Image (cartoon, helix red, strand yellow):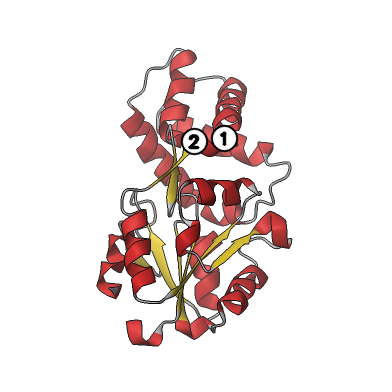
């Protein structure tokens, strides 16, 4: 397969990089402040189920007026945890926690295998890229974490005016890499946002499912990026 591939494109958040603290720990911290001490591991499991249930809806978010959606998402997690808390208090607390952490460059860290995998793939002369629904914060994070040296393509939705899952943003990345869909791979952590639209336009798709959230995804599903060791 590797002889037939020119380019490998990655989603950024949840695929190459992660939040610190992780989102399930932030959610658990909000619950604790509201009087409900919950094991963060249980929150992570409930959040993974919410990711699966809301996957298609999440893919349609446009970065504006998302409050109603995230309140429903949070309410689902509370229901999974069998907690009877004021959903408005939880939703506002979670939103405030995320708004404090997410915009900071230092809140983002590499998954342990991300850099070694990119290094290995770059030695094989694959064109490597990132396609992210993000602001210019993504470019700052990529630079700070030292990913720029491996990337031939960096497509950020706010800069190009197109968001995943629209085909146009994938096409733009392929054009910048000088390749075609059937000679490229897209790697992401969300089926409806990342992998399935890439597959629909002819790319090879790989879902990185770190929390076993999408066992029924009709796609190639791997636990982490170490899958790509076979490419070098």
Of residue 34 and residue 103, the one placed in the foreground of this image is 103
| Rendering coords of residue 198 (x, y %) | 53, 72
Of residue 91 and residue 228, the one placed in the foreground of this image is 228
| Rendering coords of residue 93 (x, y %) | 57, 23
Which image quadrant is residue 230 in? bottom left
**Residue at (74, 61) in percent of width and height:** 161
* Crowd class of label 1 (few under 14; some 14 to 19; many from 20; radius 10 Å): few
11 lies above or below 95:
below
Which image quadrant is residue 115 in? bottom left
Q: Quadrant of the N terminus?
A: bottom left
Most extreme residue toward the front is: 149
Most extreme residue toward the left is: 230
| Left or right of 185 in this view: 68 | right
| Rendering coords of residue 168 (x, y %) | 67, 72
Specify the label residue 104 is tagged with.
1
Of residue 43 and residue 75, the one placed in the foreground of this image is 43
Q: Quadrant of the C terminus?
A: bottom left
| Rendering coords of residue 88 (x, y %) | 62, 23
Specify the label residue 107 is tagged with.
2
What kind of element bears circle 1? Answer: loop
């Amino acid at each position: 397969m590797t002889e037939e591939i020119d380019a490998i494109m990655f989603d950024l958040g949840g695929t190459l990089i992660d939040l610190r603290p992780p989102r399930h720990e932030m959610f658990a911290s909000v619950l604790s402040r509201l009087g409900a001490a919950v094991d963060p591991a249980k929150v992570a499991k409930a959040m993974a189920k919410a990711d699966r249930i809301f996957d298609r809806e999440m893919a349609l978010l446009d970065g504006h007026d998302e409050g109603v959606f995230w309140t429903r998402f949070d309410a689902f997690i509370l229901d999974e945890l069998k907690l009877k808390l004021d959903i408005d208090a939880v939703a506002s607390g979670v939103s405030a926690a995320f708004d404090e952490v997410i915009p900071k460059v230092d809140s983002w860290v590499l998954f342990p295998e991300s850099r070694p995998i990119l290094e290995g793939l770059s030695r094989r002369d694959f064109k490597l890229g990132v396609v992210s629904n993000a602001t210019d914060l993504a470019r700052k994070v990529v630079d700070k974490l030292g990913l720029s040296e491996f990337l031939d393509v960096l497509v950020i939705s706010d800069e190009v005016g197109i968001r995943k899952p629209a085909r146009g943003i994938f096409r733009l990345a392929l054009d910048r890499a000088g390749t075609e869909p059937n000679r490229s791979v897209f790697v992401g952590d969300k089926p409806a946002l990342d992998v399935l639209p890439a597959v629909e336009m002819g790319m090879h798709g790989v879902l990185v499912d770190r929390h076993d959230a999408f066992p029924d995804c009709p796609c190639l599903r791997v636990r982490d990026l170490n899958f790509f060791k076979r490419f070098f």
